[in-house]
Amino acid sequence: MIKHCHLKKLLFVSLFFLTYDYSFGQREVLFEQYVQNPMAINPAFTGARETFNMTAMFRRKWFNIQNSPSSQTFAADGSFGNGKFGAGFQALNDQTSYFTTTALSASFAYHLGISDVWKLSFGGQGGINVLPVSDFSSRSYNRALGSFGVGAWLRSEQFYFGVSKPEVLSHSFGDQVIGAFYRRPLYIMTGGSYDLAEDIMLLPHALVVQEKDHKLRLDLGARVWFSEKVGIGASYRMGGGANAFSNSGINFLQISGEVQVGKNVRLGYFYNSKQVEQIFTTYTGPQGVHELMLKFVPNPNGFQKY
């Protein structure tokens, strides 16, 4: 009986450390989907497509292992007032082993036409994050934290540039270890669209991420769409070297495939060679993670580039 009790404690501790990075890095699950959902990191993008959009993503580490770590995200946004205003909603459910984290947020944006070609948007978002907190004693509990972020987005038909800080609030955690992992990144993103041929469109993008006590992170990537029906892409994400609680950074490759099914539905598959949450740990187990996407646009106003 005693041995069985010790075995259960050992198993719990092992599972805790295997999922430690995933628990404290839960916001990055949503942030990392910025290519498919730019609103994830910049509220000023809310309503920029001037039509109602819904995007659902399912993320899982191993498809062949029951109850393996997984997460689900949902985002929806649209515009009103002749395109001058945008409103959106995002939700995250991230479940790993004993831990479940959730995040809910709403966003609002104002879109200003500064010329016949350019529009400038300003946005804000607010919500709540429920994080799993442990003080390395017998107590483990969830803690609800307020969230607020801001951003700006400049765009034309062929180019965009955005600056945002999706989390600006600071929180006091006392001596809780989670304080070292609560991140408030600054994002600088740019990209565009270029016609390589009559039926071939190139969508390059670049992202710079700056965080306190972390090295700059740089993401470079592109997607190519053929006849606005099939899209393939790849991006390489490098840097992000961290503080004393993590390793020297994380470099990983994301590959993507998307199919436009009619005018309303888009399906996508994404594979990351590593998880961005591994910034927080020296975990050496299986590295990759799979993502599935369903995008639905009830009344499309054209091909959705972003």
Image: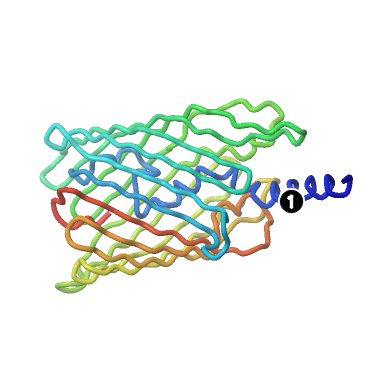
Residue 36: image x %, image y %?
35, 54
Q: Secondary structure at mark 1?
A: helix
Question: Which residue shows up at 16% across the image and 51% down it?
Answer: 300
Whether residue 195 sits left or right of residue 39 in the image: it is left
**Quadrant assignment for the C terminus:** bottom left
Give the color scheme: rainbow, by chain, secondary structure or one colour: rainbow
Residue 274: image x %, image y %?
55, 61
Q: Nearer the viewer, residue 233 or 208?
A: 233
Q: Nearer the viewer, residue 172 or 91?
A: 91
Determine whether 119 is above or below 217 in the image. Answer: above
* Residue 303 sits in quarter: bottom left
Question: Which residue shows up at 39% across the image and 33% down it?
Answer: 105
Whether residue 264 sits left or right of residue 89 in the image: it is left
* Residue 148 sits in quarter: top left
Whether residue 109 sits left or right of residue 116 in the image: it is right
Tally of numbered discs:
1
Residue 131: image x %, image y %?
57, 35
Q: Nearer the viewer, residue 162 or 306?
A: 306
Residue bearing mark 1: 14
Q: Nearer the viewer, residue 251 or 272?
A: 272
Determine whether 305 is above or below 181 in the image. Answer: below
Q: Residues within 10 Å of mark 1 (few under 14, many from 20)?
A: few
Question: Which residue shows up at 27% across the image and 40% down it?
Answer: 77
Determine whether 192 is above or below 167 in the image. Answer: below
Amino acid carrying mark 1 in the image: Ser
Determine whether 129 is above or below 67 in the image. Answer: above
Q: Residue furthest front?
A: 1
Residue 98: image x %, image y %?
63, 44
Question: Which residue shows up at 67% across the image and 50% down it?
Answer: 246
